[in-house]
Image: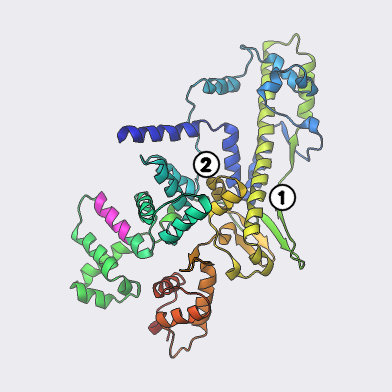
Amino acid sequence: MAQGSRQVQTQAQQQIQTLSPQQILVVKLLELPAVELEDRIRAELLENPALEEGRDDTESEEYSDNPEADNSTSESENSEYDSLGDYLTEDDIPDYKLQENNRSKGEQPEEIPFSEATSFYETLKEQLSERNITDHQRELTEYLIGSLDDDGLLRKSLESLSDELAIYAGIEASVQELEEALNIIQDFDPPGLGARSLQECLLNQIRRKAEQENENTPLLKMEERIIKDYYDEFTRKHWDKIMQRLGLDDDDFQQVITEITKLNPRPGASLGEAIGRNFQQIVPDFIVETYDDGTINVALNNRNVPELRMSRDFTELVEEHTKNKANQSKEAKEAMMFLKQKMDSAQGFIDAVKQRQNTLMTTMKAIIDIQRPFFIEGDESLLRPMILKDIAERTGLDISTISRVSNSKYAQTNYGIYPLKFFFGDGYTTEDGEEMSVREIKKALKECIESESRKKPYTDDELTDILKEKGYPIARRTVAKYRQQMNIPVARLRK
């Protein structure tokens, strides 16, 4: 078991080590919202003299750090920079090139983190990589991770997830197998992840605390009993009933409640999501315009983001050095290598910005394709069930990439500005196999409650019957769950 765990961990580390500095730069830029991207580009312009503002109009100004281009004789002569390859003897190769070559020969580089804040999905995948489990279990667990809500809870039934896997992914998985995969997630940090309800979330945190303390103290036993046996009374703050049934005095009860309120009802929110740390105001990353004929246009909001190109002055400087390369001193060659490094860095940054733009547009177009009815009408109830995996499959991008794009990004529409996460939501599968948007059901439920008589509010059973008549055949316990999620009290408290 230990050897298998070490193998999995080593494989995960090797995957990180194969990431080039360019790939890491792309990942970091991908996480940035529009405002922070502008700041990042301004900083790069100040730092790198080979980079300047302006549109890159000609192909000749593009620069590629392709080793094959440096060593070629016919194609390389078409570029004014390829003569730099003449300097790349073993003695003249700059340090930063030697470091890259050494890595390719097996030397382990210093691990470079993706960013200061990793995505929700990526954080859980890192924990998953440390588990010694089968490939099938890993596949199921990754799918469940992609199905979690932002708060870290799983609100889809395992039965519907089993159907999804069979239909969309071609993976056969029993409910029991998914239960085992879910248990793996529920063992992750922070405690409470993967719970299917707030009650289960709190219970899992209490039980984890008991495991960590290596004993189930009387206080922890009382916490567990209140959440397990008197959860309804707890959510309604019927303190007297709980105290009476458990035989607790005021001091003991207050101590228990104080500990329970320290638990985290949204464990997923405590993970490192890069949620606009420096935001002063919301600046949309996308402009989505819907026209009367049903046409939808989407564009990146690059209004204040400078366009980049290789510096013309820097290019001329390189040309001067290149003309006199025959009898250059060691200092001149070192200066040439410095220019080369700055040009590599500048072109890499330009390419990373372009890749970021392409990835963002690809993702947003896929979101619009799936949620087109909402963008046409602006009705929230028209939002279809959609998870990260849906967009990943449609775009061919990795789920972690979709997570980074949807995190801290906003879209300006005809109906207001929305975070991209707004367009993601769970679905509810009826007994007939019909998948319905949870938002749509909640909207219908809210309308029912708003239209009820204040003297005689609807009970959950009555709301269930009304919703069935409206075409939403959900169970009473589901009605109660959605009502609680919308912070709507029970009938007797709505009088």
Residue type at mark 2 is Ser
The one nearer the camera, 431 or 2, is 431
Q: Which secondary structure class fits the magenta region best? A: helix
Residue at image point 51% right, 67% down: 438
Identify the magenta region: 203-212
- Is 145 above or below relative to 221? above
- The quadrant of the image that shows the C terminus is bottom left
Look at the image and tell me whether residue 48 can be seen: no
Look at the image and tell me whether residue 371 can be seen: yes
Residue at image point 57% right, 32% down: 21
**x%, y% of residue 127?**
40, 43
- Is 45 above or below relative to 315? below
- The quadrant of the image that shows the N terminus is top left
Return the residue at label 1: 304
Return the residue at label 2: 115
**x%, y% of residue 156?**
45, 61
**x%, y% of residue 150?**
48, 57
The one nearer the camera, 463 or 252, is 463
Earlier in the chain: of badge 2 and badge 1, it is 2
